[in-house]
């Protein structure tokens, strides 16, 4: 494919994308094809000679699209949102074209420098403490990770290294304690990435019980730490969650921060979904106490209109992270090292894309007011849905509606709600996933697509009512 | 930005990309700006109101491009190549537009299924054993990881879990051995990602001495294993490298495989760069013995014309990987689980992009013959450069030229070669990085850009000769 063929193909792809997104309402949200549908439709091996571009575009529509779950359909309400905007697509096009791998400053200075500055812009938009920002000229700063899971793992490993180092400094004559005596903590609402990071890092993770608001409190953490120390273990790391996956609940960050600071534990804040809301001042109460944390993470690729992957992480002292991974082969050395970050030391992989371009494009083409308007609109749509649920006495709301998530169920036996979910997902008009806490089974309705309007929320609600009628009439 | 504005912006971006790549020869390879150049040129915070698209595109050219190291410049010879092709850009555009997060089959069936099939296509192109392919209906299969570093970490963690499980099965009454008694091995030429994976996984990594061809041999591994067992340690994991970073050397995979199979160690093959060459039968000798490995990885995003990130990993028994990370929260459960892979169990992050699209586009729009032609051309360009070096008696080749990499130095004191590198990179006409083994300091010239032609190799050589003249005249 030469330049001229690319020009024509890129125009066709642009038209295809616009047509797809403008008319996404005409598709089912979820596919109705069985597992394994695709293999019989494709050749068993790659072609020897080049295929024609036109045939590929036809195959996209005829073979791929029928198997896609459309995350940007206005009636897609599963999981949490995934970012998708035109500015972000443009940023990724440029990222691919430059095609640099920014593991060191020298490997493409602009790639590192724009990221440093964009993480400052973004941190300011969220109202993060200056100690997290590179512009403060302190030891802190931001970095774009791939996912919130990687941010948890990076901070856990950094905390592990810091604990072992402190032990060595404090007790130079003692043997290092075994890694397996290290204990990390999170709430029973925390994302599975915390447990997974514990498995990977070979440390124990204790999931602590939350209070009646599904919030982990300082006293609970304090008690667990005391128990573990009494048992000869070494508490070292806490993940505080803001906007957890099951019901968008939030730990008491200030209380956790005070306990962590007093006991020398690393506090990492996982605000993967909710963090985007802090572009609006009125939601910042949720992160009260953030200045006590060692690291903070949220995903612009979830709710801030940036395409996956773009997970924003800030640390208060970058040296803690760098020390955990620093290995310096000769082929990555260069003159003038040390004046700008070499981001390869901040992350699990070595290679990295020029992801700050899409963040830059999104912030510039929406402006802070555009980003705020997006968040506020989606929150109001969640409350609109909540009002419909509350008016229908067959349903109950199981947790306070927070940001863009509504958790609800049919009153009575949980089988009713399970049947409702099956009917909804079989029908494909809307898509939801279930949640559960304390033996309560419920449905999560997240406002996800940037195309979702009040009319779509009404449509989702009407579909839920219709299928509920069916469930309840079958029961009789 | 609405659809119509996007159409116009995407056309402009397409033109910009074509103009950038068609005229990349007119730019310096490396920037001449000091660290920190960008911050004074950008506003200190995001705008409140949206900026104009035209201003952004101007800023890209005026502020970003002067700070870019141009990895696709024909005279960029540093590191190893990074993929960048028009089909790949088109695939990523579609990936961004669909914007699904394929952590389970249900989260977007086509995303999982196309990946399964593309990994089969790719495995066949490389001539991998059927046991690695999903189509064999055995326990093996392929997955797209972000980077080779993540593939090493995933396989190390899977091997760690397998070792602990085997120990438990074999000695049900004994305590599990501590993780820190586990020992992994690689050659002294292996990538730093092996040591880093060891640090993350809290196990010891021993770098073993290679033979005169920089190749790790079975006998060396065998001896290390015996020593460690005698010291009460538990050998569990070996990384065999094909096409190492310093000098593109290759371990003796067959010998390592035999030792691993005999002793129950996991053999992971890291062919990050070299693996792409196996689309040509004539290079497959390098992977002789691959059928003895447990996992195999190479990066299509390096030398197979796919944009970063796309790291292809195959495992012989997927259950080993899945068992290492498997956690199943309710919001990820769905009907019909288990018939297709849920790739979240195969990787470090939870989220994942629809990366198989770009792989599909590249394989279809190049065809296997196009991919082969690309590899053969770049290898021949490396040999062309080698011939120039050999004709000039001031230089020596320090390792056999393998695939697209030439390792050379000025004869005599290493300061000469160091001065040469500094002059070359200051001048910015070409870009190279250094290498070192056994106290030999040298320069690595990798054929990287798909735009590199014989004329470009001549230009690189002439620049090297010119700067060498300068180094040697200054010495006198």
Image (cartoon, coloured by chain):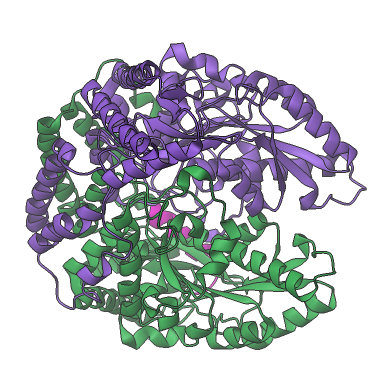
Chain colours: A green, B purple
- From this viewpoint, is residue A450 visible? no
Left or right of residue B92: residue A129: right
The residue closer to the viewer here, B351 or B257, is B257
The residue that appears at 50% across and 76% down in the rendered structure is A316
- From this viewpoint, is residue B395 visible? yes
B200 drawn magenta: no
Query: As displayed, is residue A421 above or below residue A134?
Result: above
In the picture, residue A279 is in which quadrant?
A: bottom left
Q: Position of residue B430 (x, y in %)?
A: 29, 37
Most distant residue in the right direction: B173
Over which residues does the magenta segment extend?
A: A411-425
Query: As displayed, is residue A26 above or below residue B462?
Result: below
The residue that appears at 69% across and 24% down in the rendered structure is B256
A412 drawn magenta: yes
The residue that appears at 37% across and 45% down in the rendered structure is B422
In the picture, residue A363 is in which quadrant?
A: bottom left
The residue that appears at 83% across and 43% down in the rendered structure is B233
Left or right of residue B302: residue B204: right
Q: Position of residue A61 (x, y in %)?
A: 22, 37
* Secondary structure mainly formed by the magenta segment: helix
The residue closer to the viewer here, A67 or B176, is B176
The residue closer to the viewer here, A427 or A62, is A62
Query: As displayed, is residue A206 above or below residue B379?
Result: below
Q: Position of residue B295 (x, y in %)?
A: 59, 32
Most distant residue in the front direction: B476
């Amino acid at each position: 494919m030469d330049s001229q063929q690319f020009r024509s193909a890129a125009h066709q792809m642009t038209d295809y994308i616009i047509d797809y997104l403008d008319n996404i309402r005409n598709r089912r949200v979820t596919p109705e094809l069985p597992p394994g549908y695709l293999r019989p439709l494709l050749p068993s091996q790659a072609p020897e000679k080049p295929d024609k571009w036109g045939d590929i575009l036809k195959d996209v529509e005829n073979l791929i699209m029928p198997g896609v779950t459309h995350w940007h359909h206005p009636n897609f309400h599963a999981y949490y949102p995934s970012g998708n905007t035109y500015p972000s697509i443009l940023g990724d096009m440029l990222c691919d074209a430059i095609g640099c791998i920014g593991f060191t400053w020298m490997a493409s200075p602009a790639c590192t420098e724009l990221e440093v500055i964009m993480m400052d812009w973004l941190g300011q938009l969220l109202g993060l403490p200056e100690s997290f920002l590179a512009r403060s000229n302190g030891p802190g700063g931001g970095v774009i990770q791939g996912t919130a899971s990687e941010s948890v793992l990076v901070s856990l490993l950094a905390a592990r290294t810091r604990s072992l180092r402190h032990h060595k400094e404090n007790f130079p004559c003692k043997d290092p304690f075994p890694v397996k005596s290290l204990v990390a903590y999170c709430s029973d609402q925390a994302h599975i990435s915390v447990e997974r990071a514990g498995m990977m890092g070979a440390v124990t993770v204790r999931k602590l019980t939350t209070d009646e608001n599904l919030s982990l409190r300082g006293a609970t953490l304090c008690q667990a730490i005391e128990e573990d120390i009494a048992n000869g273990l070494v508490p070292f790391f806490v993940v505080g969650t803001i906007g957890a996956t099951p019901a968008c609940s939030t730990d008491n960050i200030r209380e956790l921060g005070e306990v962590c600071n007093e006991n020398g534990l690393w506090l990492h804040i996982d605000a993967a979904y909710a963090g985007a809301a802090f572009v609006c001042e009125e939601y910042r109460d949720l992160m009260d106490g953030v200045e006590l944390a060692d690291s903070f993470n949220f995903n612009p690729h979830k709710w801030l209109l940036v395409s996956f992957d773009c997970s924003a992480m800030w640390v208060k002292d970058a040296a803690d992270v760098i020390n955990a991974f620093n290995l310096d082969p000769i082929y990555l050395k260069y003159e003038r090292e040390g004046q700008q970050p070499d981001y390869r030391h901040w992350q699990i992989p070595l290679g990295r894309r020029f992801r700050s371009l899409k963040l830059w494009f999104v912030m510039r083409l929406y402006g802070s007011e555009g980003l705020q308007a997006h968040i506020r609109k989606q929150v109001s749509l969640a409350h609109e849905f909540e009002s419909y649920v509350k008016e229908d006495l067959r349903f109950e709301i199981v947790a306070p509606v927070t940001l863009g998530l509504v958790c609800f169920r049919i009153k009575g036996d949980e089988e009713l709600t399970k049947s409702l979910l099956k009917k909804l997902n079989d029908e494909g008009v809307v898509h939801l996933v279930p949640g559960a806490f304390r033996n309560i089974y419920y449905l999560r309705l997240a406002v996800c697509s940037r195309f979702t309007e009040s009319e779509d929320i009404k449509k989702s609600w009407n579909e839920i009512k219709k299928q509920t009628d069916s469930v309840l009439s079958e029961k009789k």
